[in-house]
Image: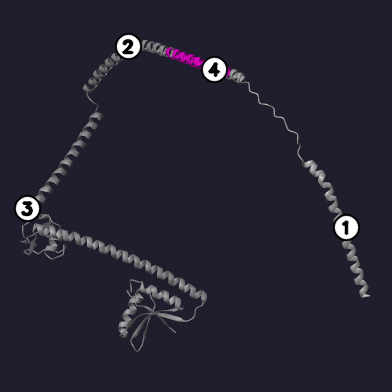
């Protein structure tokens, strides 16, 4: 049975191959038959094409070119003629405008002559009026003034006189002061000299007498400017050079004191700012402790005294500054503790506040566990 199937399959394949071979041979034959016709179509025509000869009429071209040149020359001549005509018209217009301007100028000059004469007449009238007004003013001034006018004039003259007297007094005082200064400089000895205090003398009076600052005179005698002098007391009157030196030293000392004062103010301000900031941190730490319910009590040890009396003295200083203070005796001494504070964060903030407080003047505070 299997053999018959294979035989049938082989026969079918042979038949199919024969059919395909026949079809291919048939197609090749058809192609060979149609090739001569296409070759005949593609062959070009062997008949020659005739070329038309190019003929040129030179005479006609010359005639056309000459005609164009004549037309161009005519156009150029026409343009030149128009330009010349335009220039002529422009010159005529300018001459006409110039003549018109001259005529108007002459007419204006002729019309303005009467007004000049009128102005001269008016000026003469004004001069006459001014002379009349001057005469009237002279008559008015010659007449007696009223009581009110005379009183105002009197007051004005009195005020001017008073101002003049005040100015004269001021100048006299300035002159007197300058003379006194010169005389005082002459009174200053060339070298330090002794002076015996008389009745009514004082440092201020003697300083004015010798024209020197009272501080200089006091410094020369190693006393205070407010010291009262005793009758018969001997003091030193410094020389001119010594006064100058002492004045320089006084000025330098004043500058140094001013600089020191400014520095102290700056330090005080800085300390106050630090204290304010520490107080704010302490308040925030205490608030945080309340919110978090921190446990444990801490204190800030500010000193370790040798005995109880010294500890009590330090405790009073911190209490006067507004702190809660306790003392705790130990084997090494008596502790001075500020607090207690609940929570270590609050205790640290309290320590920063104490270290920045100028009233207690300490920087060695530290936190310890209370209980």
Q: Is residue 56 magenta?
A: no
- Asked if disc 2 and disc 4 are in contact, CB closer than 8 Å, the reply is no
**Residue receiving disc 4:** 75
Q: Is residue 84 magenta?
A: yes
**Residue receiving disc 2:** 117
**Residue receiving disc 3:** 186
Marks 1, 2: nearer the viewer: 1
Is 92 left or right of 271, judged from the image as shown? Answer: right
Marks 3, 1: nearer the viewer: 1
Does 33 sit above or below residue 328?
above
Image location (x, y in percent) of residue 200: 9, 59
**Nearer-N-terminus badge (3/1):** 1
> Which of the 4 quarters of the picture holds residue 367?
bottom left
Find residue 22 and name its label. 1
Image location (x, y in percent) of residue 18: 88, 61
Image location (x, y in percent) of residue 127: 27, 16
Q: Report the magenta residues as a range.
A: 66-95
- Asked if disc 3 and disc 1 are in contact, CB closer than 8 Å, the reply is no
Q: Dot 3 surroundings within 10 Å: few (below 14), some, or many (20 or more)?
A: few
**Nearer-N-terminus badge (4/3):** 4
Q: CA distance from mark 2 to mark 4?
A: 65 Å
* Residue 201 can be seen, yes or no: no
- Asked if disc 4 and disc 3 are in contact, CB closer than 8 Å, the reply is no
**Nearer-N-terminus badge (4/1):** 1
Q: CA distance from mark 3 to mark 1?
A: 160 Å
Image location (x, y in percent) of residue 282: 43, 72
Camera-side residue: 171 or 41?
Answer: 41
Residue occupying image coordinates x 43% and y 80%: 298
Quadrant in which the C terminus appears: bottom left
Camera-side residue: 297 or 255?
Answer: 255
Residue occupying image coordinates x 15% and y 41%: 168
């Amino acid at each position: 049975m299997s053999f018959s199937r294979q035989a049938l399959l082989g026969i079918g394949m042979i038949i199919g191959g024969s059919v395909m071979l026949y079809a291919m041979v048939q197609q090749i034959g058809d192609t060979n038959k149609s090739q001569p016709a296409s070759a005949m179509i593609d062959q070009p025509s062997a008949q020659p094409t005739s070329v038309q000869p190019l003929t040129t009429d030179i005479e006609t071209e010359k005639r056309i070119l000459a005609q164009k040149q004549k037309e161009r020359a005519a156009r150029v001549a026409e343009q030149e003629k128009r330009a010349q005509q335009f220039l002529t018209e422009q010159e005529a217009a300018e001459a006409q405008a110039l003549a018109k301007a001259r005529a108007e100028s002459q007419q204006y000059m002729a019309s303005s002559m009467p007004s000049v004469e009128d102005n001269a007449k008016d000026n003469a009238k004004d001069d006459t009026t001014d002379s009349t007004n001057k005469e009237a003013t002279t008559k008015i001034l010659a007449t007696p003034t009223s009581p009110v006018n005379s009183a105002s004039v009197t007051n004005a003259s009195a005020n001017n006189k008073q101002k003049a007297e005040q100015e004269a007094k001021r100048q006299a005082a300035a002159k007197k002061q300058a003379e006194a200064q010169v005389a005082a400089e002459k009174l200053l000895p060339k070298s330090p000299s002794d002076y015996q205090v008389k009745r009514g003398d004082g440092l201020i009076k003697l300083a004015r007498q010798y024209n020197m600052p009272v501080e200089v005179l006091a410094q020369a005698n190693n006393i205070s400017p407010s010291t009262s002098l005793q009758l018969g007391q001997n003091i030193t009157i410094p020389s001119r050079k010594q006064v100058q030196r002492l004045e320089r030293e006084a000025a330098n000392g004043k500058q140094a004191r001013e600089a020191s004062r400014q520095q102290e103010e700056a330090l005080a301000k800085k300390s106050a700012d630090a204290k304010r900031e520490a107080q704010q941190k302490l308040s925030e730490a205490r608030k945080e402790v309340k919110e978090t319910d921190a446990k444990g009590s801490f204190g800030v040890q500010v000193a370790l005294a040798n005995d109880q009396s010294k500890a009590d003295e330090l405790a009073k200083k911190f209490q006067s500054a507004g702190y809660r203070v306790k003392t705790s005796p130990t084997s090494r001494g008596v502790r001075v503790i500020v607090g207690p504070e609940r929570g270590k964060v609050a205790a640290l903030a309290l320590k920063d506040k104490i270290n920045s407080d100028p009233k207690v003047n300490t920087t060695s505070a530290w936190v310890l566990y209370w209980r």
